Image (spheres, rainbow, N blue to C red):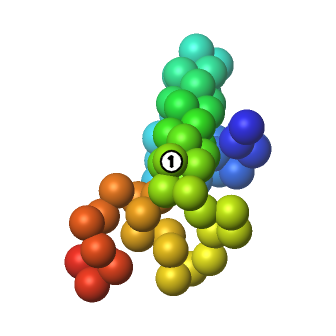
């Protein structure tokens, strides 16, 4: 789901190391996050997600809170 090279580079650029197991955990967390976004989009009866509607997916009560 995530680009492992970019993930490792982001941490490496800050002088941090990731184990393979940690990368797998972060990848699984990203999969759960994306699944949650998809579910919220579907539950909101949104057929095409646009920047104007992103507040629904992110769980905000209204777009003014963004």
Is 20 on the left-hand or right-hand side of 61? right
Q: Quadrant of residue 13?
A: bottom right
Q: Residue at x 69, y 68 (%)?
A: 48
Is 55 on the left-hand or right-hand side of 47? left
Query: Residue 37, image x and y in percent?
Result: 53, 48
Looking at this view, is 34 or 20 the one in front?
34
Q: Quadrant of residue 63?
A: bottom left
Query: Residue 6, image x and y in percent?
Result: 70, 51
Looking at this view, is 46 or 31 the one in front?
46
Residue ranking furthest to the front:
45
Residue that numbered label 1 is attached to? 43
Query: Residue 1, image x and y in percent?
Result: 73, 37
Please determine whether, in this image, residue 51 is positioned above or below residue 54. below
For the question of whether residue 19 can be seen, the reply is no
Residue ranking furthest to the top:
21
Please determine whether, in this image, residue 14 is positioned above or below residue 56. above
Total number of numbered labels?
1
Query: Residue 11, image x and y in percent?
Result: 53, 47
Please determine whether, in this image, residue 26 is positioned above or below residue 36. above
Please determine whether, in this image, residue 45 is positioned above or below residue 50. above
User: Where does the C terminus fall, quadrant-wise?
Assistant: bottom left
Q: Residue at x 70, y 42 (%)?
A: 2
Q: Residue at x 68, y 63 (%)?
A: 47
| Label 1 Cα neighbours within 10 Å, binned few <14 / some 14-19 / many ≥20 | few
For the question of whether residue 5 can be seen, the reply is yes
Element type at mark 1: helix
């Amino acid at each position: 789901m995530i680009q492992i090279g970019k993930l490792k580079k982001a941490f490496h650029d800050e002088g941090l190391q990731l184990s393979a197991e940690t990368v797998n955990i972060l990848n699984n967390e990203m999969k759960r996050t994306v699944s949650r976004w998809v579910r919220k989009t579907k539950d909101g009866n949104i057929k095409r997600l646009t920047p104007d509607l992103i507040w629904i997916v992110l769980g905000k009560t209204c777009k003014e809170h963004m």
